[in-house]
Image: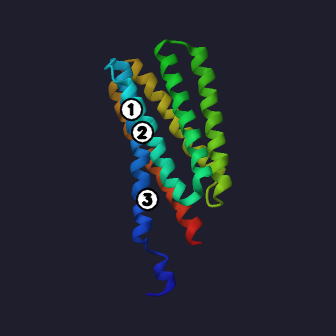
Amino acid sequence: MTNSQKDKYLTYGEMNLINNLRELWLELAMWRRAYLISYAANFGDLDLVGQRLYDSSKNLGDILKVFFGVYASGRIQTLLNEQIAISLEILNAESQKDPPTVDEATARLYQNADQLAAYLAQINPYWSEEEWKRLLYEYYENLILQMVLVFAGRYDEAIKLFEGLEDQTLNIADYMAKGIIYYFTK
């Protein structure tokens, strides 16, 4: 096999990284959805589901620590935790029909996306700040729309939107994995 042929194949480690990142980003989306449904249905398990949501960001940080070190992974995890907290503020404000708070928190959510995108692009030249913004903005937009749909009782649309969110998380995970693979192999 020539070197050009080897470049066309993923190693076991690269495939494992892709699968792990896909699993972790899907986990974040799933626990967000679980929190939204628990909140809307008042199941009484918000603390447990919320803790699991924050654990998901820690798990993602743990993977990134291997590649970018403690400081960088901690910064990314902090930004993800802030993003989770802001999205929960939006959820609460949306349920309370408080548009000014929804608007203010939404602005902070996008500021967080800008910070995360800039930081990721700073630590890895194979990640584009603009591409990260595009991916995160699209994800956050649908995350907020999902909240609106659930509180409006439009469950069929919310479920369909979540299916799209799953695809978005896979795109995010794949972009992250591709950047890491390039960073360490090119």
Give the left or right position of residue 40, taking residue 76 as reference: left
Return the x and y of residue 88 as percentages of the image width and height. Answer: 49, 25
Residue at 33% over, 19% down: 44
If you read the primary sequence from the N terminus, does the residue marked by circle 3 or circle 2 appear first?
Answer: 3
Mark 2 to mark 1 CA distance (whole Å): 6 Å
SS for tag 3? helix
For residue 88, say whether it is visible: yes
Residues 130 and 86: in front is 86
Give the quarter of the figure containing the N terminus: bottom left
Q: Residue furthest front?
A: 70
On the image, numbered disc 2 is attached to which residue? 29
Circles 2 and 1: CB atoms closer than 8 Å = yes
Give the quarter of the figure containing the C terminus: bottom right
On the image, numbered disc 1 is attached to which residue? 33
For residue 172, say whether it is visible: no
Q: As shown in the figure, which amino acid type bears the numbered disc 2?
A: Ala
Residue at 51% over, 39% down: 139
Residues 72 and 113: in front is 72
**Which class describes the residues within 10 Å of circle 2: few (<14), some (14-19), or many (20+)?**
many
User: Quick check: 119 above or below 143?
Assistant: below
Residues 155 and 37: in front is 37
Return the x and y of residue 128 as percentages of the image width and height. Answer: 64, 54
On the image, numbered disc 3 is attached to which residue? 18
Residue at 65% over, 53% down: 121
Residue at 57% over, 15% down: 99
Q: As shown in the figure, which amino acid type bears the numbered disc 1?
A: Arg
Mark 1 to mark 3 CA distance (whole Å): 23 Å
